[in-house]
Image (spheres, rainbow, N blue to C red):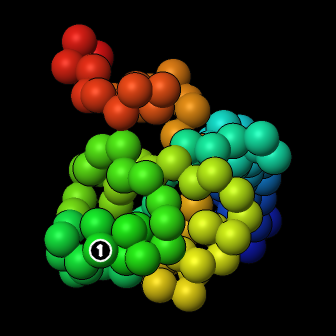
Amino acid sequence: MLFWKNTARRLARSAYALPICLAFAGLTSLAVLHVTPEPGDTAFTIIFPPGTPFEEVAVRLQKAGAQLLGPGAQDNIVVARLINSHHKDALRAEGALLFLSANTTSLCVDTTTGTENRAL
């Protein structure tokens, strides 16, 4: 009898696992779709390896021909304008790890002018 009680408890606990995993997967996919760049985007949030100083990131952007729009939350994160895919390839060669869309509603830098928006 004890075996069946313990089995019932284990099954009851594991019944929550699937809905929780599905909810987490749904929220994660929405977040990824929100920051994934669209084909016509020119403004990107670019992430370089952790520990890369901002000055070095700015030099790498200049070498690749990208326009710096503003700094990110960390020194290795910047918002930049890339005119064509050549700039993206050049930045990958310079060590850029990730390109995210900078055209989101929660961005603190106006990607049209490059000025920080302190009202947010």
Residue 16 visible in image: no
Classify 68 as above or below 2.
above
The residue under the point 56% across, 87% down is 93
Left or right relative to 106: residue 23: right
**Callout 1: 10 Å neighbours few (<14), some, many (20+)?**
few
Looking at the picture, how far across and down is residue 70, in whole percent? 30, 45
Q: Nearer the viewer, residue 103 or 23?
A: 103
**Residue toward you, 18 or 93:** 93
78 lies above or below 42: below
User: In the image, what residue occupies the spot 23% across and 59% down?
Assistant: 74
The quarter of the picture where residue 5 lies is bottom right
- Which quadrant is home to the N terminus? bottom right
Q: Position of residue 41 (x, y in %)?
A: 69, 41
Q: How many marks?
A: 1
Q: Is residue 3 left or right of residue 56?
A: right
Provide residue 33's location: percent of width, then percent of height: 73, 43
The residue singled out by tag 1 in the image is 59
Q: Quadrant of the C terminus?
A: top left
Q: Is residue 114 visible?
A: yes
Asked which secondary structure carries label 1, the reply is helix
* Residue at x-position 26% and y-position 50%: 71
Amino acid identity at mark 1:
Val
Question: In x, y percent, where is residue 57?
Answer: 30, 72
Residue drawn where x is 36% and y is 43% of the image: 69
